[in-house]
């Protein structure tokens, strides 16, 4: 597939375009891009590489920010702050990078204000709130993410909804 084409992997279609597949594992502080059908790039950040889904599945905790651009150039650092999230934090595996949906463009050590002081996810099975390690929280702490391992497809749906782009029908 040519970089920037709308993705159709197997029978799974997404709004996100395939950029640059890699087997290189993301690192804490990595900045990545994803591209939607309007040709603009959205920016994200790897906030943890040791988040736990269900107390046993290690995952990457990522942020996706409101900032968008026609280029992959690193935006101003102020745009990569935790108060500029497009969607709540998400936990995912390495597949979005190995399939090319997320492309790492830079690595930045964290500065104050760039990471939420408390991550919160709603566990719909047990109907409770937990942090990124599965520890119980007394109640919701905004922004509340959905507990679970998010696939490139569910990341695509969340970002599409956040941007007002019609979701790709399940098929």
Image (tube, grey):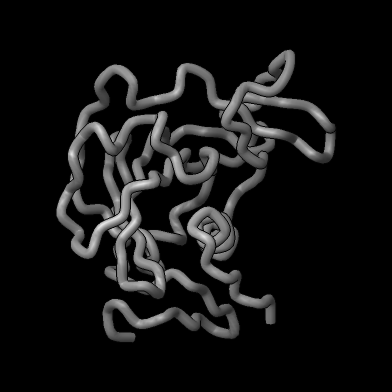
- Is 127 positioned to the left or the right of 142 in the image? right
Q: How many marks?
A: 0
The location of residue 88, given as percent across then percent down, is 54, 39
Quarter occupied by the C terminus: bottom right
In front: 134, or 152?
Answer: 152
In front: 120, or 1?
Answer: 120
The residue under the point 39% across, 44% down is 65
Quarter occupied by the N terminus: bottom left
The residue under the point 43% across, 41% down is 63
Q: Quadrant of residue 107?
A: top left
The location of residue 101, given as percent across then percent down, is 39, 65
Q: Quadrant of residue 11?
A: bottom right
Q: Is residue 102 above or below residue 67?
A: below
Q: Quadrant of residue 30?
A: top left
The residue under the point 20% across, 59% down is 72
Q: Is residue 104 above or below residue 61?
A: below
Q: Is residue 61 above or below residue 138?
A: below
- Is 145 positioned to the left or the right of 127 in the image? left
The residue under the point 19% across, 62% down is 71
- Toward the left, the furthest residue is 73
- Is 115 positioned to the left or the right of 91 in the image? left
């Amino acid at each position: 597939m040519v970089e920037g084409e709308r993705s159709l992997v197997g029978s799974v279609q997404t709004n996100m375009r395939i950029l640059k597949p890699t087997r290189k594992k993301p690192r804490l502080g990595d900045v990545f891009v994803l591209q939607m059908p309007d040709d603009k790039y959205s920016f994200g950040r790897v906030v943890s590489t040791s988040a736990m889904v269900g107390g046993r599945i290690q995952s990457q905790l990522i942020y996706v920010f409101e900032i968008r651009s026609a280029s992959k150039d690193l935006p101003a650092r102020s745009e990569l702050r935790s108060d500029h999230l497009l969607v709540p934090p998400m936990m995912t595996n390495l597949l979005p990078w190995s399939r090319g949906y997320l492309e790492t463009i830079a690595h930045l050590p964290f500065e104050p204000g760039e990471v939420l002081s408390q991550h919160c996810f709603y566990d719909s099975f047990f109907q409770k709130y937990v942090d990124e390690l599965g520890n119980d929280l007394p109640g919701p702490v905004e922004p509340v993410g959905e507990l679970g391992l998010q696939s490139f497809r569910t990341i695509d749906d969340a970002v599409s909804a956040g941007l007002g782009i019609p979701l790709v029908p399940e098929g």
